[in-house]
Each structure stands twice: as structure tokens, then as C-alpha cells.
Image (cartoon, rainbow, N blue to C red):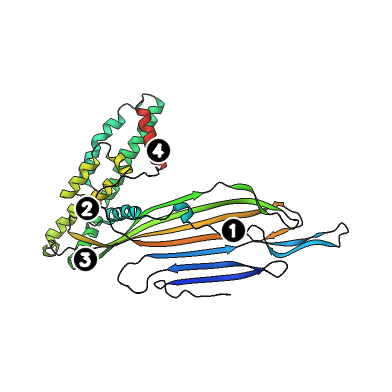
């Protein structure tokens, strides 16, 4: 039996934690329990390193019971903590979610910068005002027929009412937002580093459920039950920002700094004018579905005069195989003790940066909300 304790995730480490479960004849053993594999760089404490850690938990049910002869005394066959016949290893989560390519990391780098950029407004007042012009057009024609009314209602909610409510909520806390922005500016003026984190998505996929899957079919016993696998993925990113050597921020007094905080909070900057022009361009929303134009514009906003560094993408994935024998579909004299526990967790960290400084096209997987928008537009064009 091998046993290694994990001491430091910043060191290369490969550990295995096993429990041996004997088969019925006692001559062979199988390995179940916990395994972990960690790959990291030694040293470089101040830098950011690639990192991969995998944790695998494997536990199988065991069979017990005895089949008696018709005389009720003679034992024809028996199980005593015998491992069940179907003993899979949980799949690596990348079997479904895939490995990240250089193009993927480039796109994620732009998204991280777009989400964490300290120069971005808390709420873009110019964009909010410009989008109000679309509201009358969305409401016009209500009552034509039921299908078109539903389509217009969907678009009005997604493109007008929901963004307006979100902006009003943010404006309600305008003083809190300004104070927070002022604190960030004071920290930057003192030469300190801003560390930002953003959530980039969470997804889940479940395979088709098999209701009569065969788990045991040998030694005179049969057991069937349900089997399906759930894959989950969560992605987030971090970045750090510090003041540029030629920035005007260190020379600003209290009044000028307060004014800058207000302009940044509400989007009254020259760069935000570019972002507003893009947002108000017809069909820009559709272009952003299939490219990262909006991310590049947001990430390029440098109204404060900052430099970014240490952009990191983190990804946490799970594979959980749900396998459960059904007593009603199991040979009557055979008892299945315990349940399957098949879990594979994978944690990844990738240093990344925007290699290609221009927007790139992509082929996204459209969400239910995006499909509903396309369906509503199709209805209104009839």
C-alpha cells in the first residue's frame, strides 16, 4: 500500500490513497479509495504558474448472500463482500469539457480584462439614455396578435425593461459606488496593486439516464439499476492592476480625484463614448454573440492609466457518475451493500494574456435566452 501526504500545492506532488478490498477467493485484490495528482512549479512565489490538480474517489458496492439448495441447507454459491462486476473508473472531466487551446486562453484573457477593468463604469449613463430610444419601437404594435405580442414582450423585457431596472438599481447606490471607486483610486495613487476577480460561467451536462443498466451478470447473480453521469464546470478569472509611470493620477488633488471617481462610476469618459457608440450600433448585440468585439472595447478602456499583469484563468470541473443497483432488479438471494461513489474533480490554473490584439470570430453555444431572442425576431418578421 502506498501512502503519500500532500504537504504543499506549490510543489510537484503525486499521491495515492488506496484501500484494498479482497475478492471472494482471497487470491486477488482490487484498489479503491482516493487518488490525487498535483502538478505545480517549485519556487517562483511572486509569479503565477500553471497548475493542475486531480482528485479521484472510487468506491464500489459489494455483494453478500448465499444461494441454498432445495433442501434449504446446502450452499450452492455465496458472496462475502465480493466486489460487484461493473467497476468503472470515473472519466476525466475534460472528456466532455475538453482541453483549453491557445485561442481559448486568448479569448478568456480579453474577457477577464473586460470584466475586471477598474476603468469601466458602474453604470453607463450615456448607454442607458441612448437605449431609451428603442423602447417606443418595441412597444409599438402590441395587440396585433397573441404570438407577436408575446414576441414583443420578450424583446421589451430583455432589451429595455430588464437593463433599465438593473441600471436603476445601480444608480440607487450611486454614492456607495462612487466611494468604492474613490478608495480604489487612492490605493492606486499610493502605488498599491488592485487585485480583481470575475466569474466567467458555470455549466452542467447530464448524460441520458439508463434505467436497466447491467451491473452484475456472473456467478449465478444478476443485478440491474440506473446509471448516468453529470459533468459540471465553473470558470473564473483574476487580474492585477497598477498605475502606469506616466499616469496623471499621482498628481491629482482631492477634488480632482473625487471628480474622476464620479465620471468613472457613471461612464462620462471619452472611451466610454466609444463603447456607447458600439452598443447603440444596430445588430452589435448579434456581433458580440459571435465575436469578442465588446470585450476588446471594454478591456481597452484605460481612462485611469493602468497596466495589467498576472492574468489567470481558473477552471474547476467535476465528473460524478451516479450508479445505483436496484434491489427489485437483483437476484433475490443476492444483497448489494453500499452504493457506487465515482467522482473525478479537476482544478486548473492557466496564466494567460491577450496575444491577438484584434477581435476574433467564434462559434458559441447559444443559451436558451439567446434562442428566445432569435425566435421572437423571427416571429416579428413574418
Percent x, y of residue 93: 48, 56
Task: Look at mark 2 in the image and give the residue it sits on.
Answer: 300
Q: Residues within 10 Å of mark 2 (few under 14, many from 20)?
A: some
Where disc 4 sits, the SS reads: helix
Which one is in front in this view, the residue at disc 2 or the one at disc 1?
Answer: 1
Q: Earlier in the sequence, mark 3 or mark 4?
A: 3
Whole-angstrom CA distance, mark 1 to mark 4, is 37 Å
Q: What is the crowding at mark 4: few (fewer than 14 residues within 10 Å), some, or many (at least 20)?
A: few
Residue 268 shows in this picture? no
| Quadrant of the rendering where the N terminus is positioned | bottom right
Residue drawn at point x = 24 percent, y = 66 percent: 193
Report the mark closest to the observer, 1 or 4: 1
Residue situated in front as seen by the camera: 169 or 272: 272
Contact? badges 2 and 3 (CB < 8 Å):
no
Label 1 with label 4: CB-CB less than 8 Å:
no
Question: Pointer 3: residues within 10 angstroms few (<14), some, or many (20+)?
Answer: some
Q: Would you name the residue on which mark 1 appears? A: 88
Cα separation, mark 4 vs mark 2, equals 30 Å
Cα separation between marks 3 and 4:
43 Å
Q: Locate residue 167, reporting x and y percent.
A: 28, 46
Identify residue for label 4.
Answer: 371
* Residue picked out by circle 3: 187
Amino acid at each position: 500500500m502506498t501512502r503519500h501526504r500532500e504537504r504543499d500545492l506549490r510543489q510537484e506532488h503525486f499521491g495515492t490513497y488506496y484501500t484494498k478490498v479482497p475478492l471472494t477467493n482471497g487470491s486477488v485484490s482490487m484498489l479503491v479509495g482516493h487518488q490525487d495528482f498535483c502538478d505545480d512549479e517549485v519556487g517562483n512565489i511572486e509569479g503565477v504558474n500553471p497548475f493542475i490538480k486531480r482528485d479521484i474517489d472510487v468506491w464500489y458496492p459489494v455483494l453478500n448472500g448465499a444461494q441454498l439448495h432445495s433442501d434449504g441447507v446446502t450452499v450452492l454459491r455465496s458472496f462475502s463482500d465480493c466486489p460487484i462486476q461493473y467497476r468503472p473508473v470515473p472519466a476525466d472531466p475534460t472528456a466532455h469539457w475538453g482541453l483549453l487551446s491557445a485561442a481559448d486562453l486568448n479569448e478568456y484573457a480579453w474577457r477577464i480584462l473586460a470584466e475586471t477593468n477598474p476603468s469601466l463604469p458602474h453604470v453607463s449613463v450615456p448607454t442607458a439614455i441612448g437605449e431609451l430610444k428603442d423602447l417606443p419601437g418595441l412597444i409599438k404594435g402590441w395587440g396585433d396578435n397573441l404570438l407577436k405580442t408575446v414576441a414583443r414582450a420578450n424583446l421589451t423585457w430583455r432589451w429595455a425593461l430588464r437593463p433599465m431596472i438593473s441600471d436603476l438599481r445601480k444608480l440607487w447606490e450611486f454614492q456607495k459606488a462612487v466611494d468604492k471607486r474613490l478608495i480604489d483610486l487612492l490605493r492606486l495613487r499610493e502605488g498599491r496593486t488592485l487585485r480583481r476577480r470575475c466569474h466567467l460561467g458555470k455549466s452542467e451536462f447530464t448524460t441520458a439516464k439508463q434505467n436497466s443498466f447491467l451491473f452484475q451478470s456472473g456467478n449465478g447473480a444478476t443485478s440491474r439499476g440506473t446509471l448516468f453521469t453529470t459533468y459540471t464546470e465553473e470558470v473564473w478569472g483574476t487580474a492585477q492592476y497598477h498605475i502606469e509611470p506616466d499616469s496623471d493620477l499621482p498628481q491629482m488633488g482631492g477634488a480632482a480625484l473625487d471628480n474622476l471617481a464620479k465620471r468613472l462610476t457613471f461612464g462620462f469618459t471619452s472611451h466610454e463614448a466609444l463603447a456607447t457608440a458600439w452598443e447603440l450600433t444596430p445588430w452589435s448585440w448579434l456581433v458580440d454573440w459571435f465575436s469578442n468585439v465588446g470585450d476588446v472595447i471594454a478591456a481597452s478602456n484605460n481612462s485611469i492609466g493602468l497596466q495589467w499583469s498576472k492574468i489567470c484563468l481558473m477552471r474547476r470541473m467535476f465528473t460524478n457518475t451516479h450508479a445505483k443497483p436496484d434491489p427489485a432488479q437483483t437476484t433475490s438471494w443476492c444483497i448489494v451493500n453500499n452504493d457506487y461513489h465515482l467522482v473525478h474533480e479537476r482544478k486548473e490554473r492557466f496564466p494567460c494574456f491577450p496575444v491577438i490584439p484584434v477581435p476574433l470570430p467564434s462559434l458559441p453555444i447559444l443559451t436558451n435566452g439567446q434562442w428566445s431572442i432569435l425566435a421572437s425576431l423571427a416571429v416579428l418578421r413574418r
